[in-house]
Amino acid sequence: MLQQHNTLQLVLQNAVWFHTYIAHMVYVVPYVFLSMAVAYRKFDNRYAMVAQSLGKTPWQVFYRIKLPLMLNAILVAWALGLAISFSQYLPTLLASGGTIATITTEAVASVSGSSTRLTAVYVIIQGAMPLIGFVIAWYLPGVLMKNRGASIKEKNKRRAVLHGT
């Protein structure tokens, strides 16, 4: 057990990414939690109770009922977490000691003496990254639910053919 602990310490000692990840999570998790808490409180548990009363397992209830109903909120929370993480300058700089270069750290560094064109490019990229996350969160539920609806219709057609109706 002691050897495993020492090995873990050696691996994480040089893993600057791990410290940076933890530093980002300190700022991201509260916002993600706050955005998910409202949707979770609004979720009507009667759907889950009906599914369980019809013999569905907890995993089936989660996958078939809860996840589709909360998918929009989950994806918006994910996009919000990305946007917050993309904007973290000081946590990235302090946790990595300046060894991890991100768009944000490079944008701040370019402001202090680089060309204004390069700074403008960094600003546009930094604005586009969260926008892409929110666009994905906007369109992905429609794509996933459209395919899910098509698969349900196909199952119903197969059942009708099998039962001769």
Image (cartoon, rainbow, N blue to C red):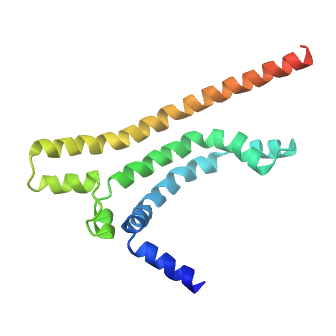
Which residue shows up at 55% across the image and 46% down it?
74
Number of numbered discs visible in the structure rendering: 0
* Left or right relative to 123: residue 2: right
Q: Position of residue 3 (x, y in %)?
A: 55, 83
Q: Position of residue 148 (x, y in %)?
A: 66, 29
* Left or right relative to 76: residue 89: left
Which residue shows up at 39% across the image and 66% down it?
23
On screen, residue 135 above or below 158: below
Depth check: 53 or 125 in front?
125
Say which quadrant the N terminus sits in.
Answer: bottom right
| Residue 124 visible at all | yes
On screen, residue 150 above or below 138: above
Which residue shows up at 39% across the image and 64% down it?
17
Depth check: 144 or 54 in front?
144
* Direction top: furthest residue: 165
* Left or right relative to 40: residue 160: right
* Direction bottom: furthest residue: 2
| Residue 45 visible at all | no
On screen, residue 12 above or below 79: below
* Left or right relative to 162: residue 105: left
Which residue shows up at 10% across the image and 44% down it?
116
Say which quadrant the C terminus sits in.
Answer: top right
Depth check: 13 or 136 in front?
13
Q: Position of residue 102 (x, y in %)?
A: 29, 54
Write down the quadrant of residue 142 in the picture. top right
Q: Position of residue 92 (x, y in %)?
A: 32, 63
